[in-house]
């Protein structure tokens, strides 16, 4: 046998189901997110273009074997963008972000 609190809860839920569609500010479920397939590689760098010049060829060789779309994002900090000009020329498909101010890994 169900007690009075069970019936009260059942009635409240039934009322909420009837009111929700017409209530003006009722919360709506979030829209479904459409995720695209692919791979993003983020490389934080702090004023070390010489290290990137040895890292990027190996990265692109490895990505050549991946059967997915990919993007490479390089976040450079602590140096001017001029120091990376040759690398940007060699890897034009990479997305380059620059900050003259040194950033830690979390902020990069």
Image: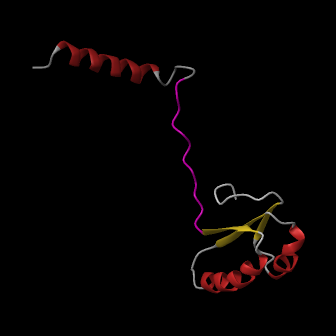
Residue sitting at x 40%, y 21%: 16
Q: Is residue 101 left or right of residue 105?
A: right
Residue sitting at x 86%, y 73%: 83
x then y, percent, for residue 9: 28, 19
Residue 8 vs residue 23, the one in the foreground: 8
Residue sitting at x 54%, y 47%: 32
Residue sitting at x 76%, y 74%: 48
Quarter of the image where one finds residue 38 = bottom right
x then y, percent, for residue 22: 52, 21
Q: Which residues are magenta?
A: 26-38
Is residue 39 a member of the stretch shown in magenta?
no
What is the image's colouring? Answer: secondary structure
Please tell me whether residue 45 is drawn above or below residue 89 in the rendered image.
above
Please tell me whether residue 40 is drawn above or below residue 60 in the rendered image.
above
Is residue 37 a member of the stretch shown in magenta?
yes
Residue 82 vs residue 59, the one in the foreground: 82
**SS majority, magenta:** loop
Please tell me whether residue 75 is drawn above or below residue 51 in the rendered image.
above
Considering the image in quadrants, where does the N terminus appear? top left
Quarter of the image where one finds residue 25 = top right
Quarter of the image where one finds residue 78 = bottom right
């Amino acid at each position: 046998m169900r007690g009075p609190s069970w019936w009260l809860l059942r009635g409240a839920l039934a009322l909420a189901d009837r009111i929700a569609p017409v209530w003006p500010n009722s919360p709506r479920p979030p829209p479904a997110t459409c995720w695209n397939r692919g791979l993003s590689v983020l490389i934080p760098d702090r004023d070390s273009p010489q290290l990137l010049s040895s890292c990027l060829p190996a990265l692109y060789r490895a990505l050549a074997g991946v059967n997915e779309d990919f993007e490479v994002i390089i976040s450079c900090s602590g140096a001017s963008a001029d120091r990376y000009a040759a690398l940007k020329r060699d890897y034009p498909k990479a997305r380059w972000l620059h900050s003259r101010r040194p950033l830690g890994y979390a902020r990069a």
